[in-house]
Amino acid sequence: MKMAELDIHSDDYALTVHTSQDILECMQKGKLDSISVLVNMTCSGECIDMLVDAVPTLPFLPKMSVHLDFVEGKCLAGSGEVPLLARKGSDLIGLSWGKLFFLSFYPGKRKAVKKQLKKEIRAQLAAGWKEIQRCMRAAEACHIPCEQKNLRIDAHQHAHMIPVVWEALTEVIEEEHYEVEYIRNSKEILGAFLSEGTLLKTYRPVNVVKNRLLYLLSRKVDRYAREHSMKPMYLWGLVMSGYMDYDRIVRLYPAVAGKAAEEHRILEFCIHPGRMLAEEVTPEVDRQAADDFYLCSDRQVEKDTVMRLSSLRTKSL
């Protein structure tokens, strides 16, 4: 029987210190195959130092992606260099997903936005890859297994899927001669979630819309993966975004994982097991996102899910 190749992944390492401590606990128990790391938050350096110090306590070092962020944190390229990306009168970045998507099709500003996006992407990739390599060297020095070889990339709120961002990202990769082993394809199989009729009312309509839009934008990422010898993938983390609970995952697993196995795709569970503390909400953080997600007790549900997900590796399809 076919087995789905699973990648249990946590986003948002280095969003805040407490968020990172929760994710690090999952890593120390060997429950995460990969994580995404933010490098443009004030606490990013502290959180990455914490990870480097903890490397000797890990059973293995998960693969690490640079988590590009155009919504929160600081402009690493400098607000003077990327004024269209910065919040007015500050050095904080602050473009919404919707605005970035709109600018992809707005001739008057598209060229300027793309140019500034390239500056910020270049800065975030350089900073992120440097820190990831530091973690990899720490693992090598301690004889801690690590399978990562080259740069891995994804983005906060899947913003890299937006046309103008995707163009800017792929151009930077080529210009900087990065060897990239993974770029997340935010492509999720809607039909598998609709196959369980009793669960339909448990999905937020906005997440279904997100699923359809990102599916339409996924073709270019599939094509890029084929052209650059990257393993194709499916994502699990859009329709159930904000509440990735274990019970529904188990019920849906045969349909979702079966489709991934049939098409020889990796199945990435994109989960957020790190919870922010109220005192960690700063101007760098989007207040609505904090109230709706970062501070929510549902993050503990997702942490509990991570602790149990490895049991799916034994399930044949």
Image (cartoon, helix red, strand yellow):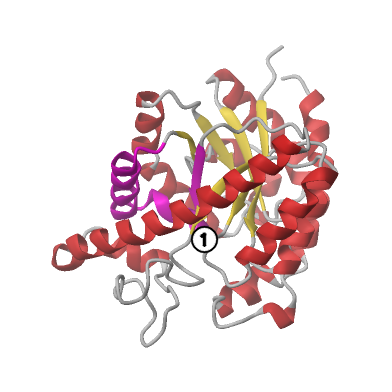
Q: Is 174 one of the magenta-colored residues?
A: yes
Q: Which residue range is magenta in the image?
A: 151-178
Residue 80, given in percent of the width and then of the height, sits at 31, 77
Image coordinates for residue 40, horizontal then vertical, percent: 52, 65
In this picture, residue 249 sits left or right of residue 108: right
Q: Residue furthest top?
A: 1
* Residue farthest along the front direction in this orientation: 141
Q: Quadrant of the N terminus?
A: top right
- Residue 209 in view, yes or no: no
Q: Is residue 48 left or right of residue 224?
A: right
Residue at the image position 29 percent from the left and 73 percent from the top: 84
Tell me, yes or no, whether the highlighted magenta stretch contains residue 133: no
Does residue 6 appear in the picture of this structure? yes
User: In the displayed structure, does residue 300 sit left or right of residue 121?
Assistant: right
The amino acid type found where label 1 is placed reads: Val
Q: Is residue 242 above or below residue 270?
A: below
The residue where tag 1 is placed is 206
Q: Residues within 10 Å of mark 1 (few under 14, many from 20)?
A: few
- Given residues 18 and 270, the one toward you in this image is 18
Report the residue at 72% width, 64% height from top.
19
- In this view, the residue farthest toward the left is 108
Residue 246 x/y as whole percent: 79, 46
Residue 233 coordinates in the image, percent (x, y):
52, 31
The secondary structure that dominates the magenta segment is helix
The C terminus is located in which quarter?
Answer: top right
The kind of secondary structure element at disc 1 is helix
Residue 45 image-quadrant placement? bottom right
Q: Residue at x 19, y 67 (%)?
A: 109
Q: State the residue in front, 304 or 225.
A: 225
Judge by depth and name the residue closer to the eye, 23 or 149. 149
